[in-house]
């Protein structure tokens, strides 16, 4: 039990609960703290614990396991973001020279993909319509159909 005014053990218990989202995001959103800050809380808790009432070993090991889960969740989340970005880029480059339909509100733009670019980590397409109009900055997510180039 910590002597400090914060109940770190109680706060950490809720963080280790598995959820659909990343445990790292859960920790950050729940406490506004990252892994390093949470680790400092545990170290501070150990430093200021009452020597006559030391922390229960099971509780301490449980907290360390939860911190390990948070760190693994952060690493996995970063790797998944990199993988998704690489796959989107690969998918977009395979569209070069092909004709695509792009959903644009209640209408559909049809054009040949002339260029692929990355803007703020998102893949953007540039198409040329049959009328010779060039449209840039189209999201890959808006592509509704892909056909062989003509």
Image (cartoon, rainbow, N blue to C red):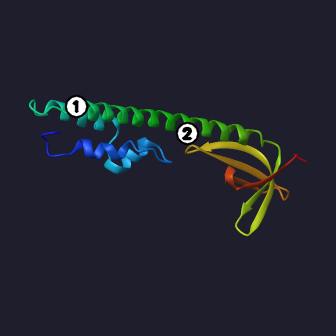
Cα–Cα span, label 2 and label 1: 31 Å
Percent x, y of residue 47: 15, 30
Q: Secondary structure at mark 2?
A: helix
Task: Return the residue found at the far left.
Answer: 52
The residue indicated by pointer 2 is 81
Quadrant where the image shows the N terminus: top left
Question: Residue at 24% of width from left, 37% of height from top?
Answer: 41
Which mark identifies residue 43? Answer: 1
**Other residues around mark 1 within 10 Å, as few (<14) / some (14–19) / many (≥20):** few
Report the mark closest to the observer, 2 or 1.
Answer: 1
Query: Which quarter of the picture shows residue 104?
Result: bottom right
Task: Return the residue found at the far right.
Answer: 150
Residue 136 in sight here: yes
Percent x, y of residue 131: 84, 59
Please state if 124 lies on the left or on the right of 121 as rendered.
Answer: right
Seen from the viewer's position, the closer of residues 64 and 73 is: 64
Question: Residue at 50% of width from left, 35% of height from top?
Answer: 76
Percent x, y of residue 91: 72, 40
């Amino acid at each position: 039990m910590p002597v400090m005014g914060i109940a770190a053990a109680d706060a950490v218990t809720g963080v280790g609960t598995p959820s659909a989202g990343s445990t790292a995001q859960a920790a950050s959103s729940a406490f506004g703290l990252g892994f390093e800050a949470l680790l400092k809380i545990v170290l501070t808790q150990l430093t200021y614990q009452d020597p006559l009432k030391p922390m229960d070993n099971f509780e301490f090991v449980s907290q360390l396991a939860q911190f390990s889960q948070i760190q693994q969740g952060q690493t996995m989340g970063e790797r998944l973001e990199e993988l998704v970005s690489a796959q989107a880029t690969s998918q977009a480059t395979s569209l070069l020279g092909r004709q695509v339909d792009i959903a644009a509100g209640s209408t559909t733009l049809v054009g040949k993909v002339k260029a692929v670019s990355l803007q703020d980590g998102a893949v953007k397409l540039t198409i040329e319509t049959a009328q010779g109009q060039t449209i840039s900055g189209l999201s890959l997510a808006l592509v509704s159909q892909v056909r062989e180039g003509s």
